Image (tube, rainbow, N blue to C red):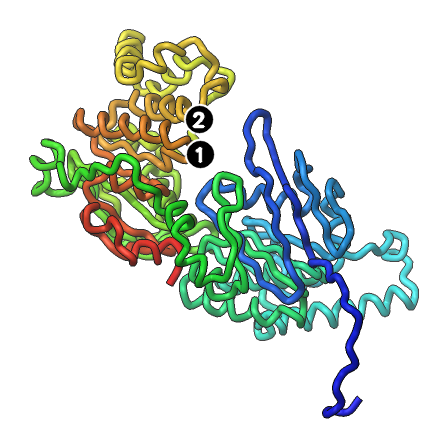
Amino acid sequence: MTATTEPTAEPAIDRQPLLRADDLTMTFGGITAVKDFSFHIEPGEIVGLIGPNGAGKTTCFNMLTGFYAPSNGRVRFKGQDITNRKPHAIARLGLVRSFQKTNVMKRLTVFENVLTGHYMASRQSLLATFFPGEAVRRAEREARESAAAIVETMGLAQRMNAPAHLLSCGELRLLEVAVALAAKPSLLMLDEPAAGLNSHEAGTFGAVLKTLIGRSIDALLIVEHNMDLVMSVSDRIVVLNFGRKLAEGRPAEIIENRQVAEAYLGKGRRMTLLSESPSPSAIAQAADAPVLAVEGLHVAYGSTAALHGVSLDVRAGETVALIGANGAGKSTILRAISGLLKARSGTIVWNGKSIANLPADRIVAAGIAHCPEERHVWPNMTVQENIALGAYLCRSREEVQRRIGMAFHRFPRLRERSRQMAGTLSGGEQQMLAIARALMSEPRLLMLDEPSLGLSPKMADEVFDVVRSVNAHGVTVLLVEQNIHNALGAASRAYVVKTGRITASRPSAELRGDPDLLRAYLGG
């Protein structure tokens, strides 16, 4: 056929998507994590899967790749029904995934890591390994050539022989993708591949991902909290919320979608900003020196930087919120303050004394309580037994009983369920239990991490009524909350956190409706 010859018309072909999921549902006991989720991926596409914390994204990943057997629905890959197949069998068909935690071996070189990925994906017999013939030797040469080509594709050629532990965070993320490519995927699924990258590293990473389509893989599905990255690389975006598909479209359409904005920022129900009607304690203490002052805080998870020079302060009697997208570093800030994470550098001063890198129990004794996102209630212990665990600093049984009585006075719903097993409580009741237990140390600062996560709007309102009551009784509150309506409704002011940095600090009334805040969640 010459360049000027018109191609002959071919009969219409009903093309199958590369991946198709129909009505996927996943239940855990009586809890439905994902409901009737359907979507598809075409060859040549990069698809982003996004949603607020707890939306069901990783559950969907696990159903698509065989780590979870769906309660209902089907998954088809290249026209084959792969529902309920084992993960290794699905991977051999060409559907390969990464995990949130790194899968590289730090003592091996870049090349050795990729070559190991090839060996793990191969089906070479043990006998052939010990008694290699010409076919095995030829396969070995091809594997080494393939590994070298993958390293070059990922832009790591100059680091080919460098041990993985010497790589930068950005180079490690590229190596993780290289190891996945060694399995020769048709569809590559990446779960939080850019975690810990700064904006420059994320930009480089995204540019490399785009080059893979049609060259190394047929399509890419990415779950990522870095919205700038997702919006820049994706052809199409699917949004999950409360386990259901909320929206689907091009990045520009998703950014303008009102339902998506409400899913991330919250829809107003009972907005009463404390900045409009501040509590007496907030007014009295507004001019005081901060009781908590964080300066230049740097924190990392291994070689992955999480916080980059964070500075903030909290005054006595305030409720202050940390807001921002999933993975921005909000929870890491709380964990560093409470001693659960070591700071690489920076200062944390509480009531005039440095507490940076002190053991967590000493920080609790100093008057700071941390109520983590996971709640950590003991399901096979009663409500009262769970509450009593928070009084481990008390020296007398009488004092423990006094504090339990105070907890039940503050949380009458828990008094009614005092002998009930904690595992049988609703999500909202478990959150109240976690707060009650944290208050048993009688802290002067209460740090709450995602107190409304997974709760119905009505129950979330009840939990935040408790937060306001605690603050009104003189306890200072530092709050991490994904739902902006709840956060700004409880806090007098807020810090906006993005990719491990504080990007804004303003009164809650000024942040409400600010377009810059939406960009912090959805990129731009």
43 vs 218, nearest the viewer: 43
From the image, tell me which residue sits under label 2.
427
Q: Residue at x 39, y 59 (%)?
A: 523
Please indicate, yes or no, whether residue 375 appears anywhere in the rendered image. yes
Q: Which quadrant is the N terminus positioned in?
A: bottom right
Q: Identify the element where label 2 is drawn.
A: helix
The amino acid pointed to by label 1 is Gly
Q: Residue at x 62, y 69 (%)?
A: 212
Q: Quadrant of residue 515?
A: bottom left
Report whether 502 appears left or right of 163.
Answer: left
> Image check: 125 left or right of 503?
right
Mark 2 is surrounded, within 10 Å at the Cα level, by few (under 14), some (14 to 19) or many (20 or more) other residues, namely some
Residue of label 1: 454
Q: Position of residue 411 (x, y in %)?
A: 30, 17
| Residue depicted at 80% across the width and 70% down the height | 11
- Marks 1 and 2, how far apart in space? 7 Å
Mark 1 crowd level (few <14, some 14–19, many ≥20, 10 Å Cα): some
Q: Position of residue 193 (x, y in %)?
A: 53, 56
- Would you place residue 320 above or below residue 384 in this image? below
Position in image of residue 350 (x %, y %): 21, 39
Looking at the rendering, in which quadrant would you find the C terminus? bottom left
Of labels 1 and 2, earlier in sequence is 2
- Report whether residue 353 is seen: no
